[in-house]
Image (spheres, helix red, strand yellow):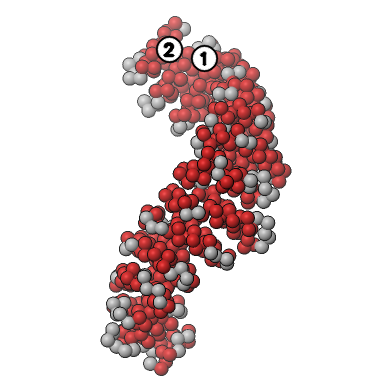
Amino acid sequence: MSLLCFTDVEASEKVQEMGVLPLLSPLLDPKSSCAPKVANIIAEMAKNEFMRGPCVEAGLVPPLVQLLHCKDQEVLLQTGRALGNICYDSHEGRSAVDQAGGAHIVAEHLKSLSQNTDAANGKLLTVFCGMLMNYSNDNDALQAQLINMGVIPTLVKLLGIHSQNAALTEMCLVAFGNLAELESSKEQFAATNVAEELVRLLRKQEEHEKKEMIFEVLAPLAENDVIKLQLVEAGLVECLLEVVDQTVDAEREEDVAELKTASDLMVLLLLGDESMQKLFEGGKSSVFQRVLSWVPSNNHQLQLAGALAVANFARNDGNCIHMVDTGIVQKLLELLERHVEEGNVTVQHAALSALRNLAIPVVNKSKMLAMGVADVVLKFLPSEMPPVQFKLLGTLRMLIDTQADAAEQLGTNPTLVERLVEWCDAKEHAGVMGESNRLLSALIRHSRSKDVVRTVIQGGGVKYLVTMATSEHVIMQNEALVALGLMAALDLGLSEKDFLSASLVQVLHKLLSDESSAPEIKYNSMVLICAVMGSEPLHKQVQDLAFLDLVSQLRAHENKTVSHQASLTEQRLTVQS
């Protein structure tokens, strides 16, 4: 036994070489007085990674787990240490503890001992928390097992009762951090008072590391909408605003990190509908005002968080109308102007997102256009960053919806149309490609202008609209067909050449033949067939493809609008055949 008093690497190697490990198992008898010493020796040896596997192979885990049934505090302490160290980063160790049922016994101990606040018990609770953490770390199945055992309510209780015990508090936080990543944990957390406990703990922290630990738990928990609201009600927002105030002008790396974490978390809280609306309070809340003041700040992180917060507040018409009427658009435009040159992509993206959301209510569109939003947004046309391109396109599309004059003004801007046509080919960025097609179509649909049609034709946009008519998304197919129908109605002569080269008639035949085509697609395809009949070469293609048979069949379509349009189209085809 004297050799076992030395538990450094060298001694551990000698123990292994001499085959001593299997001899320790009988010494772990609950009746043996040396059981706690042996458990302590195993705990020390298992600090060495190379000893964990041999400890398992020597069959030490089952007798250690049996020791967990003892009442003696020292035995429990050393046994908890030994099992925790054997589990640390060891698949074999965790598996052996799992098979022996060790985690369940430890979880029960935590529950029964949670009320006891004396120092020795606090130490034991800390060791047991650490053991469960090592047991389940980075292992979803074992974390799920602990959640099913009801470990979460116990840990939350420990955090409340033992808040003066720094080591135990820290261990609880690390355990939370592990478990909170799992979706199945969120429901259990939501059923506890974890929000109040974490906010209370955050309030009294001075050290950066401790705050960071709490933030690391808050971030995954705040992804759950119920917990978001609980955190808001527990006063987390006020804590976050205080952190922002304390770190906004600081230059130390840890303060900059804290500012980012606090402002990011603030934005995350606003992603929940209830928590967002509670913080908006009809636009009168001090929190809303404070967050708005971040937009014109000189700190990029706060500008970003402020713009993202506006985008999150702008998730219903009432909020959007209030914000546009109270001057937020001007702040966002000034922010964008500052970033045309500075070029911070995340800020550009966030500010454009906010403007896009604000432009959704019909009453806001003309107001925002009058404020010059389109002109500022167009300054980002040269951007080569797909996220900025995507939001720019979405913002313009929202702005011109039902706004004929604006659609005509933008649709006759050759620089914009050429850029759209270029992006319609951006196959590596599906979002940008889709939005470009949709905006191109929207310019025609909302302007109903011959000049816009000509600009799109001259810019080479027709073939992309024809391709868009075959999109997997019905809404995009429909938008393309309506735009193409307007082109045919407004200037068939100029459109004819491009319609022919893009095989428009063949595409329409395919759409009408396809049984899975939506009723509105069949309807608009027939309207378009009628519209192109005034062109001789297109008319000939329609005749060659035997459209008449196809359309005749659609007269029996269950959708009345489709069957009616089929009758009209059949008459047109018969008259002109």
Quarter location, residue 493: top right
Quick check: 74 left or right of 163?
left
Name the quadrant of the N terminus.
bottom left
Residue 532, numbered circle: 1
Report the front residue among 288 and 260.
288
- How far across and down, in percent of the image, does residue 392 sit? 61, 36
Quick check: 510 left or right of 24?
right
Residue count near mark 2 (Cα–Cα under 10 Å), binned few <14, some 14–19, many ≥20: many
Quick check: 303 left or right of 203?
right
Residue visible at 51% across and 63% down?
A: 213
Residue 569, numbered circle: 2
Report the front residue among 453 and 273.
273
Identified by mark 2, the residue type is Thr
Name the quadrant of the C terminus.
top left
Residue 457, numbered circle: none
Number of labels in the image equals 2
Quarter location, residue 261: bottom right
Sooner in the amino-acid sequence: mark 1 or mark 2: 1
Identified by mark 1, the residue type is Val
Residue visible at 43% across and 19% down?
A: 523
Q: Seen from this angle, which residue lies furthest top?
A: 575
Q: Seen from this angle, which residue lies furthest bottom?
A: 2
Q: Secondary structure at mark 2?
A: helix
